[in-house]
């Protein structure tokens, strides 16, 4: 359970730190999509922080967190392979892919904690 706590705590802190400055930057493209994306992503960071407080009780939400990371990772990877993405956006997608794997590990190890309870 400690591993799951740390993974989700670090993911939430990292996400808030990386996303919050975007609220104060000029919108890239359509403002409603840009700021809407930032807002929705920040809400997910709150979900990650809630899971960090109670990984066993909120284990049911972990697969949704994995899908949240997969959604951005898969899109960025696909666009990169087509030559349509590079730089910071590419690395942001790859970082989400790493979090996705860590979330899957947390989900897996928290199952053992659930069975022991």
Image: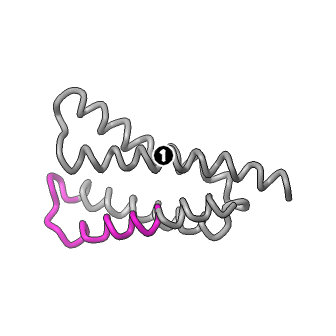
Q: Residues within 10 Å of mark 1 (few under 14, many from 20)?
A: many
Q: Residue at x 21, y 26 (%)?
A: 82
Looking at this view, is 76 or 30 the one in front?
A: 76
Residue 65 pos. (x, y %): 53, 51
Q: Is residue 110 left or right of residue 22?
A: right
Determine the secondary structure under disc 1.
Answer: helix
Count of marks, rendered view: 1
First to last magenta residue range? 11-31
Q: Residue at x 48, y 46 (%)?
A: 100
Looking at this view, is 22 or 29 the one in front?
A: 22
Q: Residue furthest top?
A: 82
Q: Quadrant of the N terminus?
A: bottom right
Residue 22 pos. (x, y %): 24, 66
Judge whether residue 17 is colored magenta: yes
Decide: is 12 above or below 107: below
Decide: is 4 above or below 91: below
- Picture quadrant where residue 40 is located: bottom left
Residue 114 pos. (x, y %): 79, 54
Name the chief secondary structure element in magenta.
Answer: helix
- Picture quadrant where residue 21 is located: bottom left
Decide: is 110 above or below 75: below
Q: Residue at x 36, y 49 (%)?
A: 95
Q: Quadrant of the C terminus?
A: bottom right
Residue 73 pos. (x, y %): 37, 41
Q: Is residue 17 left or right of residue 114?
A: left
Judge whether residue 25 is colored magenta: yes
Q: Which residue is mark 1?
A: 100
Q: Residue at x 67, y 61 (%)?
A: 55
């Amino acid at each position: 359970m400690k591993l799951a706590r740390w993974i989700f705590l670090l993911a939430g802190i990292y996400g808030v730190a990386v996303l919050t400055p975007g609220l104060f930057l000029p919108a890239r493209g359509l403002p409603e999509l840009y700021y809407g994306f930032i807002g929705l992503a920040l809400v997910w960071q709150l979900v990650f922080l809630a899971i960090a407080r109670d990984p066993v009780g909120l284990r049911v939400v972990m697969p949704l967190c994995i899908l949240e990371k997969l959604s951005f990772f898969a899109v960025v990877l696909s666009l990169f392979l087509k030559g349509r993405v590079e730089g910071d956006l590419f690395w942001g997608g790859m970082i989400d892919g790493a979090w996705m794997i860590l979330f899957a590990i947390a989900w897996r190890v928290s199952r053992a904690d659930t069975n022991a309870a």
